[in-house]
Image (cartoon, rainbow, N blue to C red):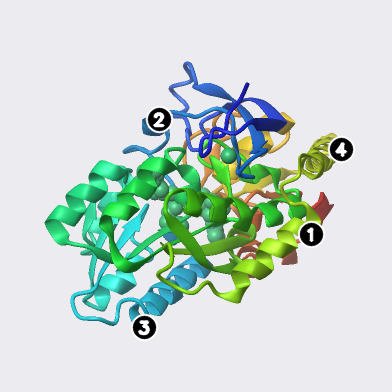
Protein backbone atom coordinates (compact mmCIF):
# COMPACT_ATOMS: atom_id res chain seq x y z
CA UNK A 1 0.00 0.00 0.00
CA UNK A 2 1.25 3.49 -0.88
CA UNK A 3 1.21 5.95 1.99
CA UNK A 4 1.16 9.75 2.23
CA UNK A 5 4.57 11.38 2.82
CA UNK A 6 2.91 13.90 5.18
CA UNK A 7 0.37 12.01 7.30
CA UNK A 8 0.94 8.30 6.40
CA UNK A 9 -2.69 8.07 5.24
CA UNK A 10 -3.57 5.93 2.27
CA UNK A 11 -2.32 7.29 -1.06
CA UNK A 12 -4.51 6.64 -4.12
CA UNK A 13 -2.50 6.70 -7.32
CA UNK A 14 -4.38 8.30 -10.25
CA UNK A 15 -1.82 8.96 -12.97
CA UNK A 16 1.23 7.04 -14.20
CA UNK A 17 3.63 8.63 -16.71
CA UNK A 18 5.86 5.56 -16.80
CA UNK A 19 9.66 5.75 -16.72
CA UNK A 20 10.92 9.32 -16.80
CA UNK A 21 14.41 10.85 -16.63
CA UNK A 22 15.70 13.69 -14.42
CA UNK A 23 13.89 16.74 -15.80
CA UNK A 24 16.97 18.98 -15.53
CA UNK A 25 19.40 16.18 -16.46
CA UNK A 26 20.52 17.58 -19.81
CA UNK A 27 23.26 15.51 -21.42
CA UNK A 28 26.50 16.34 -23.16
CA UNK A 29 26.27 14.99 -26.73
CA UNK A 30 29.58 13.15 -26.28
CA UNK A 31 28.20 11.40 -23.19
CA UNK A 32 25.19 9.33 -24.11
CA UNK A 33 25.68 6.63 -21.48
CA UNK A 34 23.22 5.44 -18.89
CA UNK A 35 20.55 7.85 -17.76
CA UNK A 36 18.70 7.76 -14.48
CA UNK A 37 15.03 6.84 -14.84
CA UNK A 38 12.28 6.51 -12.26
CA UNK A 39 8.54 5.84 -12.36
CA UNK A 40 6.69 9.16 -12.42
CA UNK A 41 3.27 8.60 -10.88
CA UNK A 42 0.94 10.81 -8.82
CA UNK A 43 -1.47 10.01 -6.03
CA UNK A 44 -3.83 11.80 -3.65
CA UNK A 45 -3.99 11.17 0.10
CA UNK A 46 -7.44 10.03 1.22
CA UNK A 47 -6.85 11.60 4.66
CA UNK A 48 -5.06 14.94 4.33
CA UNK A 49 -5.78 15.53 0.56
CA UNK A 50 -2.11 16.08 -0.32
CA UNK A 51 -1.39 15.29 -3.98
CA UNK A 52 2.13 13.92 -4.37
CA UNK A 53 4.50 11.75 -6.36
CA UNK A 54 4.67 8.09 -5.37
CA UNK A 55 8.44 7.82 -5.87
CA UNK A 56 11.16 10.08 -4.55
CA UNK A 57 14.28 10.92 -6.57
CA UNK A 58 17.40 11.38 -4.39
CA UNK A 59 17.85 15.14 -3.96
CA UNK A 60 21.56 15.27 -4.84
CA UNK A 61 20.72 13.91 -8.34
CA UNK A 62 18.54 16.97 -9.01
CA UNK A 63 20.08 19.84 -7.05
CA UNK A 64 23.83 20.01 -7.43
CA UNK A 65 26.60 21.99 -9.14
CA UNK A 66 25.08 21.21 -12.57
CA UNK A 67 21.58 22.47 -11.79
CA UNK A 68 20.92 24.71 -14.82
CA UNK A 69 17.69 26.59 -14.04
CA UNK A 70 18.09 30.36 -13.74
CA UNK A 71 15.23 32.24 -12.10
CA UNK A 72 16.27 35.57 -13.66
CA UNK A 73 15.67 34.31 -17.22
CA UNK A 74 12.21 35.88 -17.40
CA UNK A 75 11.59 39.64 -17.15
CA UNK A 76 8.08 38.98 -15.79
CA UNK A 77 9.53 36.81 -13.00
CA UNK A 78 12.20 39.45 -12.22
CA UNK A 79 9.44 42.03 -11.75
CA UNK A 80 7.33 39.56 -9.75
CA UNK A 81 10.15 38.94 -7.25
CA UNK A 82 11.10 42.61 -7.03
CA UNK A 83 7.51 43.33 -6.01
CA UNK A 84 7.56 40.40 -3.55
CA UNK A 85 10.74 41.70 -1.89
CA UNK A 86 9.34 45.22 -1.81
CA UNK A 87 6.19 43.93 -0.13
CA UNK A 88 8.21 42.22 2.64
CA UNK A 89 10.39 45.32 3.09
CA UNK A 90 7.30 47.46 3.63
CA UNK A 91 5.47 45.02 5.93
CA UNK A 92 7.21 42.27 7.89
CA UNK A 93 10.75 43.70 7.68
CA UNK A 94 10.16 47.23 8.87
CA UNK A 95 11.62 46.68 12.35
CA UNK A 96 15.26 47.30 13.17
CA UNK A 97 17.65 44.45 12.42
CA UNK A 98 14.97 42.43 10.63
CA UNK A 99 16.14 39.17 9.08
CA UNK A 100 14.76 37.33 6.04
CA UNK A 101 15.80 33.82 5.03
CA UNK A 102 15.03 32.52 1.55
CA UNK A 103 15.02 28.81 0.75
CA UNK A 104 15.97 28.04 -2.85
CA UNK A 105 17.10 31.60 -3.64
CA UNK A 106 18.58 30.39 -6.94
CA UNK A 107 20.50 33.21 -8.72
CA UNK A 108 19.26 35.81 -6.23
CA UNK A 109 16.30 37.07 -8.24
CA UNK A 110 14.38 37.99 -5.05
CA UNK A 111 17.17 38.59 -2.51
CA UNK A 112 18.85 41.18 -4.75
CA UNK A 113 16.19 43.74 -3.80
CA UNK A 114 16.43 42.85 -0.10
CA UNK A 115 20.25 43.11 -0.19
CA UNK A 116 20.11 46.46 -2.00
CA UNK A 117 17.78 47.78 0.72
CA UNK A 118 20.50 46.89 3.25
CA UNK A 119 18.25 44.42 5.10
CA UNK A 120 19.79 41.38 6.78
CA UNK A 121 19.14 38.26 4.71
CA UNK A 122 20.41 34.78 3.96
CA UNK A 123 19.79 32.51 0.99
CA UNK A 124 19.88 28.75 1.48
CA UNK A 125 20.58 27.24 -1.91
CA UNK A 126 22.01 23.70 -2.39
CA UNK A 127 22.75 24.08 -6.09
CA UNK A 128 26.28 25.50 -6.26
CA UNK A 129 25.87 26.60 -9.90
CA UNK A 130 23.14 29.11 -9.07
CA UNK A 131 24.23 29.93 -5.49
CA UNK A 132 27.52 31.21 -6.98
CA UNK A 133 25.60 33.63 -9.20
CA UNK A 134 23.75 35.01 -6.17
CA UNK A 135 26.97 35.28 -4.17
CA UNK A 136 28.68 37.22 -6.95
CA UNK A 137 26.04 39.92 -6.64
CA UNK A 138 26.79 40.50 -3.00
CA UNK A 139 23.95 38.36 -1.70
CA UNK A 140 24.61 36.29 1.43
CA UNK A 141 24.02 32.65 0.57
CA UNK A 142 24.97 29.26 1.98
CA UNK A 143 25.20 26.21 -0.28
CA UNK A 144 23.10 23.82 1.78
CA UNK A 145 19.82 21.96 1.66
CA UNK A 146 17.45 23.58 4.13
CA UNK A 147 16.31 21.07 6.76
CA UNK A 148 16.02 21.01 10.55
CA UNK A 149 19.79 20.96 11.20
CA UNK A 150 20.47 23.85 8.79
CA UNK A 151 17.76 25.92 10.47
CA UNK A 152 19.14 25.28 13.94
CA UNK A 153 22.64 26.31 12.80
CA UNK A 154 21.33 29.54 11.25
CA UNK A 155 19.33 30.42 14.37
CA UNK A 156 22.36 29.87 16.60
CA UNK A 157 24.57 32.04 14.41
CA UNK A 158 22.13 34.73 13.33
CA UNK A 159 19.04 34.66 15.53
CA UNK A 160 15.40 34.37 14.54
CA UNK A 161 14.02 35.32 11.14
CA UNK A 162 10.92 37.51 10.75
CA UNK A 163 10.29 36.04 7.31
CA UNK A 164 11.15 32.66 5.82
CA UNK A 165 10.32 32.75 2.13
CA UNK A 166 10.45 30.16 -0.62
CA UNK A 167 9.22 30.30 -4.22
CA UNK A 168 8.88 27.18 -6.32
CA UNK A 169 10.94 25.30 -3.76
CA UNK A 170 8.72 23.87 -1.00
CA UNK A 171 6.85 21.71 -3.51
CA UNK A 172 10.28 20.32 -4.51
CA UNK A 173 11.00 18.97 -1.02
CA UNK A 174 9.57 15.58 0.05
CA UNK A 175 10.88 15.84 3.64
CA UNK A 176 8.51 18.59 4.79
CA UNK A 177 8.47 17.32 8.39
CA UNK A 178 12.11 18.38 8.67
CA UNK A 179 11.35 21.69 6.90
CA UNK A 180 8.58 22.55 9.38
CA UNK A 181 10.79 21.58 12.33
CA UNK A 182 13.41 23.87 10.82
CA UNK A 183 10.91 26.68 10.42
CA UNK A 184 9.87 26.16 14.03
CA UNK A 185 13.49 26.53 15.15
CA UNK A 186 14.30 29.55 13.01
CA UNK A 187 11.13 31.63 12.78
CA UNK A 188 10.56 34.52 15.21
CA UNK A 189 7.53 33.94 17.49
CA UNK A 190 5.38 36.29 15.39
CA UNK A 191 7.17 35.69 12.09
CA UNK A 192 5.75 34.30 8.85
CA UNK A 193 6.69 31.38 6.63
CA UNK A 194 5.59 32.32 3.11
CA UNK A 195 5.81 30.07 0.08
CA UNK A 196 4.39 30.08 -3.42
CA UNK A 197 4.01 27.07 -5.68
CA UNK A 198 1.86 25.84 -8.60
CA UNK A 199 -1.77 25.51 -7.52
CA UNK A 200 -3.47 22.12 -7.92
CA UNK A 201 -6.72 23.75 -9.10
CA UNK A 202 -4.90 25.56 -11.93
CA UNK A 203 -3.03 22.39 -12.90
CA UNK A 204 -6.31 20.47 -13.09
CA UNK A 205 -8.22 23.25 -14.88
CA UNK A 206 -5.52 23.68 -17.51
CA UNK A 207 -4.73 19.93 -17.69
CA UNK A 208 -1.17 21.15 -17.19
CA UNK A 209 0.28 17.67 -16.96
CA UNK A 210 3.81 18.95 -17.60
CA UNK A 211 3.83 20.49 -14.11
CA UNK A 212 4.36 16.88 -13.05
CA UNK A 213 8.05 15.88 -13.02
CA UNK A 214 10.72 14.68 -10.57
CA UNK A 215 11.34 18.06 -8.91
CA UNK A 216 7.66 18.78 -8.30
CA UNK A 217 7.00 16.32 -5.51
CA UNK A 218 3.84 17.99 -4.12
CA UNK A 219 0.88 19.68 -5.83
CA UNK A 220 -0.51 21.94 -3.14
CA UNK A 221 -4.05 23.09 -2.50
CA UNK A 222 -5.40 25.29 0.29
CA UNK A 223 -6.91 22.18 1.80
CA UNK A 224 -3.68 20.13 1.89
CA UNK A 225 -1.47 23.02 3.00
CA UNK A 226 -3.87 24.01 5.74
CA UNK A 227 -3.96 20.41 7.08
CA UNK A 228 -0.17 20.16 6.86
CA UNK A 229 0.40 23.46 8.68
CA UNK A 230 -1.91 22.34 11.48
CA UNK A 231 -0.19 18.99 11.74
CA UNK A 232 3.14 20.73 12.38
CA UNK A 233 1.81 23.27 14.92
CA UNK A 234 1.27 26.14 12.49
CA UNK A 235 -1.72 27.80 10.87
CA UNK A 236 -2.47 28.93 7.34
CA UNK A 237 -3.31 32.63 7.78
CA UNK A 238 -3.44 33.95 4.21
CA UNK A 239 -3.59 32.78 0.62
CA UNK A 240 -3.22 34.74 -2.59
CA UNK A 241 -3.58 33.47 -6.13
CA UNK A 242 -0.70 34.47 -8.38
CA UNK A 243 -0.76 34.64 -12.19
CA UNK A 244 2.84 33.37 -12.60
CA UNK A 245 4.05 29.96 -13.85
CA UNK A 246 0.60 28.94 -15.06
CA UNK A 247 -1.17 29.74 -11.77
CA UNK A 248 0.19 29.58 -8.24
CA UNK A 249 -0.89 30.27 -4.68
CA UNK A 250 1.17 32.17 -2.12
CA UNK A 251 0.59 30.60 1.30
CA UNK A 252 1.32 32.58 4.47
CA UNK A 253 1.82 30.44 7.55
CA UNK A 254 2.24 31.59 11.15
CA UNK A 255 2.52 29.84 14.50
CA UNK A 256 -0.93 28.59 15.54
CA UNK A 257 -3.02 31.34 17.14
CA UNK A 258 -0.53 34.18 16.46
CA UNK A 259 -2.39 35.85 13.59
CA UNK A 260 -6.02 36.15 12.53
CA UNK A 261 -6.58 34.22 9.30
CA UNK A 262 -7.63 36.39 6.36
CA UNK A 263 -11.09 35.61 4.89
CA UNK A 264 -9.39 34.46 1.67
CA UNK A 265 -8.35 31.20 3.37
CA UNK A 266 -11.91 30.07 4.16
CA UNK A 267 -13.15 31.36 0.80
CA UNK A 268 -10.66 29.39 -1.29
CA UNK A 269 -11.04 26.34 0.94
CA UNK A 270 -14.80 26.28 0.44
CA UNK A 271 -14.40 26.70 -3.33
CA UNK A 272 -12.07 23.69 -3.36
CA UNK A 273 -14.58 21.64 -1.36
CA UNK A 274 -17.52 22.65 -3.56
CA UNK A 275 -15.76 21.50 -6.70
CA UNK A 276 -14.35 18.36 -5.05
CA UNK A 277 -10.82 19.34 -6.05
CA UNK A 278 -9.10 16.51 -4.15
CA UNK A 279 -11.65 13.82 -4.87
CA UNK A 280 -10.20 10.81 -6.61
CA UNK A 281 -12.96 10.67 -9.24
CA UNK A 282 -12.24 14.27 -10.30
CA UNK A 283 -8.52 13.69 -10.43
CA UNK A 284 -9.11 10.60 -12.55
CA UNK A 285 -10.99 12.86 -14.99
CA UNK A 286 -7.77 14.83 -15.45
CA UNK A 287 -6.09 11.72 -16.86
CA UNK A 288 -8.46 11.45 -19.83
CA UNK A 289 -7.82 15.08 -20.79
CA UNK A 290 -4.06 14.57 -20.57
CA UNK A 291 -4.19 11.49 -22.80
CA UNK A 292 -6.22 13.40 -25.38
CA UNK A 293 -3.74 16.31 -25.37
CA UNK A 294 -0.86 13.86 -25.84
CA UNK A 295 -2.53 12.14 -28.81
CA UNK A 296 -3.48 15.42 -30.48
CA UNK A 297 -0.03 16.93 -30.03
CA UNK A 298 1.77 13.92 -31.47
CA UNK A 299 -0.61 13.66 -34.38
CA UNK A 300 -0.23 17.39 -35.18
CA UNK A 301 3.57 17.17 -35.09
CA UNK A 302 3.60 14.06 -37.29
CA UNK A 303 1.35 15.71 -39.87
CA UNK A 304 3.45 18.87 -39.96
CA UNK A 305 6.67 16.91 -40.40
CA UNK A 306 5.11 14.71 -43.09
CA UNK A 307 4.12 17.93 -44.91
CA UNK A 308 7.75 19.06 -44.80
CA UNK A 309 7.26 21.86 -42.25
CA UNK A 310 10.08 22.89 -39.94
CA UNK A 311 9.23 22.53 -36.26
CA UNK A 312 11.39 23.52 -33.28
CA UNK A 313 10.74 23.90 -29.56
CA UNK A 314 10.94 27.10 -27.49
CA UNK A 315 12.15 26.78 -23.87
CA UNK A 316 13.92 23.60 -22.76
CA UNK A 317 11.92 23.67 -19.54
CA UNK A 318 11.95 20.97 -16.87
CA UNK A 319 8.27 20.62 -17.77
CA UNK A 320 9.19 19.73 -21.36
CA UNK A 321 10.91 16.56 -20.11
CA UNK A 322 7.50 15.13 -19.20
CA UNK A 323 5.95 16.27 -22.48
CA UNK A 324 8.71 14.84 -24.68
CA UNK A 325 9.11 11.55 -22.82
CA UNK A 326 5.44 10.89 -22.12
CA UNK A 327 4.41 11.78 -25.70
CA UNK A 328 7.43 10.16 -27.34
CA UNK A 329 8.63 13.39 -28.99
CA UNK A 330 12.24 13.26 -30.18
CA UNK A 331 14.43 15.14 -32.69
CA UNK A 332 12.44 13.54 -35.53
CA UNK A 333 9.41 15.66 -34.56
CA UNK A 334 11.08 18.71 -32.93
CA UNK A 335 14.51 19.39 -34.50
CA UNK A 336 15.91 21.45 -31.62
CA UNK A 337 14.79 23.57 -28.69
CA UNK A 338 15.81 27.21 -28.39
CA UNK A 339 16.70 28.28 -24.84
CA UNK A 340 18.48 31.30 -23.37
CA UNK A 341 20.07 29.36 -20.47
CA UNK A 342 23.84 29.06 -21.10
CA UNK A 343 24.13 25.72 -19.23
CA UNK A 344 21.40 24.11 -21.34
CA UNK A 345 22.76 25.16 -24.74
CA UNK A 346 24.82 22.55 -26.62
CA UNK A 347 23.26 19.77 -24.54
CA UNK A 348 20.55 17.20 -25.26
CA UNK A 349 17.22 17.03 -23.47
CA UNK A 350 16.93 14.18 -20.94
CA UNK A 351 15.48 10.95 -22.29
CA UNK A 352 14.29 12.47 -25.58
CA UNK A 353 17.74 13.72 -26.72
CA UNK A 354 16.56 16.82 -28.56
CA UNK A 355 19.44 19.29 -29.07
CA UNK A 356 19.18 22.57 -27.13
CA UNK A 357 20.45 25.64 -29.01
CA UNK A 358 20.82 29.34 -28.34
CA UNK A 359 18.12 31.90 -29.15
CA UNK A 360 20.21 32.99 -32.15
CA UNK A 361 19.54 29.67 -33.89
CA UNK A 362 15.79 30.23 -33.60
CA UNK A 363 15.88 33.03 -36.17
CA UNK A 364 18.47 31.44 -38.42
CA UNK A 365 16.07 31.05 -40.23
CA UNK A 366 12.77 31.18 -38.29
CA UNK A 367 11.00 27.80 -38.40
CA UNK A 368 7.43 27.32 -39.66
CA UNK A 369 6.24 26.20 -36.20
CA UNK A 370 7.51 26.43 -32.64
CA UNK A 371 6.20 24.32 -29.77
CA UNK A 372 6.01 26.70 -26.80
CA UNK A 373 7.29 24.43 -24.03
CA UNK A 374 7.68 27.56 -21.84
CA UNK A 375 3.91 28.22 -22.14
CA UNK A 376 3.89 29.69 -18.63
CA UNK A 377 5.88 32.61 -20.08
CA UNK A 378 3.67 32.82 -23.19
CA UNK A 379 2.74 36.49 -22.93
CA UNK A 380 6.36 37.59 -22.50
CA UNK A 381 7.72 35.30 -25.22
CA UNK A 382 5.02 35.82 -27.86
CA UNK A 383 5.34 39.61 -27.43
CA UNK A 384 9.11 39.64 -27.82
CA UNK A 385 9.11 37.17 -30.71
CA UNK A 386 6.82 39.26 -32.94
CA UNK A 387 9.31 38.85 -35.80
CA UNK A 388 8.72 35.10 -35.77
CA UNK A 389 5.02 35.78 -36.32
CA UNK A 390 5.79 38.40 -38.97
CA UNK A 391 7.87 35.80 -40.83
CA UNK A 392 4.77 33.57 -40.99
CA UNK A 393 5.75 31.45 -37.98
CA UNK A 394 3.09 29.87 -35.76
CA UNK A 395 3.12 28.82 -32.12
CA UNK A 396 1.95 25.39 -31.01
CA UNK A 397 0.47 25.27 -27.51
CA UNK A 398 -0.78 22.17 -25.67
CA UNK A 399 -2.06 23.73 -22.42
CA UNK A 400 -5.02 23.94 -21.79
CA UNK A 401 -5.50 22.16 -25.14
CA UNK A 402 -3.59 21.59 -28.34
CA UNK A 403 -3.84 24.58 -30.67
CA UNK A 404 -1.90 26.56 -33.24
CA UNK A 405 -1.85 30.35 -32.81
N1 LIG B 1 13.06 30.53 -5.99
C1 LIG B 1 13.45 30.46 -7.37
C2 LIG B 1 12.30 30.76 -8.28
O1 LIG B 1 11.16 30.78 -7.84
O2 LIG B 1 12.53 30.94 -9.47
C3 LIG B 1 14.08 29.10 -7.70
C4 LIG B 1 13.15 27.97 -7.89
S1 LIG B 1 13.95 26.50 -8.45
C5 LIG B 1 12.67 25.81 -9.39
C6 LIG B 1 14.02 25.48 -6.99
C7 LIG B 1 15.25 25.77 -6.17
O3 LIG B 1 15.14 25.08 -4.91
C8 LIG B 1 16.53 25.28 -6.81
O4 LIG B 1 17.41 26.36 -6.98
C9 LIG B 1 17.04 24.21 -5.85
O5 LIG B 1 18.43 24.13 -5.81
C10 LIG B 1 16.42 24.64 -4.53
N2 LIG B 1 16.24 23.60 -3.48
C11 LIG B 1 15.96 22.30 -3.63
N3 LIG B 1 15.90 21.69 -2.42
C12 LIG B 1 16.14 22.63 -1.48
C13 LIG B 1 16.24 22.65 -0.06
N4 LIG B 1 16.06 21.55 0.67
N5 LIG B 1 16.52 23.81 0.56
C14 LIG B 1 16.70 24.96 -0.15
N6 LIG B 1 16.63 25.01 -1.50
C15 LIG B 1 16.35 23.87 -2.16
P1 LIG C 1 10.43 27.70 -16.53
O1 LIG C 1 9.16 27.55 -17.29
O2 LIG C 1 10.70 26.56 -15.61
O3 LIG C 1 10.56 29.05 -15.89
O4 LIG C 1 11.61 27.59 -17.61
C1 LIG C 1 11.68 28.48 -18.68
C2 LIG C 1 12.75 28.01 -19.65
O5 LIG C 1 12.60 28.71 -20.87
C3 LIG C 1 14.17 28.27 -19.18
O6 LIG C 1 15.01 27.20 -19.58
C4 LIG C 1 14.56 29.55 -19.90
C5 LIG C 1 13.75 29.48 -21.18
N1 LIG C 1 13.33 30.78 -21.68
C6 LIG C 1 13.78 31.19 -22.93
O7 LIG C 1 14.52 30.47 -23.61
N2 LIG C 1 13.40 32.43 -23.38
C7 LIG C 1 12.58 33.24 -22.64
O8 LIG C 1 12.25 34.34 -23.09
C8 LIG C 1 12.10 32.78 -21.36
C9 LIG C 1 11.19 33.64 -20.53
C10 LIG C 1 12.50 31.55 -20.92
ZN1 LIG D 1 -1.90 12.57 3.94
Asked if the residue under mark 1 is in contact with the one under mark 2, i.e. CB atoms within 8 Å, the reply is: no
From this viewpoint, which residue is outermost toward the front? 257
Give the alpha-carbon distance from disc 3 to disc 2, as whole Å: 38 Å
Q: Does the image show residue 359?
A: no
- x, y percentage for residue 196? 51, 60
Residue at mark 1 = 274
Q: Which percent across, then down, holds residue 207?
A: 75, 48
Which residue corresponds to mark 2?
61
Q: Is residue 387 above or below residue 62?
A: below
Quick one: label 2, few (<14), some, or many (20+) residues within 10 Å? few
Q: Is residue 121 left or right of residue 183?
A: left
Q: Is residue 18 above or below residue 86?
A: above
Eye-nearest disc, 3 or 2: 3
| Real-space Cα separation, disc 1 to disc 4, in angstroms | 42 Å
Q: Secondary structure at mark 2?
A: helix
**Residue shown at 56%/43% (left/top)?**
218
| Secondary structure found at label 3 | helix
Label 3: which residue?
A: 90
In this rendering, would 281 be left or right of 35?
right
Q: Which mark sits nearer the N-terminus, 4 or 2?
A: 2
CA distance for labels 4 and 2? 37 Å
Secondary structure under the numbered disc 1 in the rendered image: helix
Q: Position of residue 289 (x, y in %)?
A: 83, 43
Q: Where is mark 4, residue-wise? A: 303
Vertical arrangement, residue 145 with respect to residue 8, above or below: below
Amino acid sequence: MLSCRICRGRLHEFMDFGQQPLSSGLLDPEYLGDEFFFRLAVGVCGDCTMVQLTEEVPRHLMFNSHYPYLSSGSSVMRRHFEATAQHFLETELDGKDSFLVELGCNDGVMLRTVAEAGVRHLGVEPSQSVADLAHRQGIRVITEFFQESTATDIRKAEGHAQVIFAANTICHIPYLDSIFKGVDALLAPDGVFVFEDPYLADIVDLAAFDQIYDEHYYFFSVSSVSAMAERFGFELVDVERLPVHGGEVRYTIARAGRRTPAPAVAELLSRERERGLSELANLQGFVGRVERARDELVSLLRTLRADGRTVVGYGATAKSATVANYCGIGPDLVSFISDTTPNKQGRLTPGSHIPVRSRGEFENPFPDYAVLFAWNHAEEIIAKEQQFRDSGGKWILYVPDVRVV
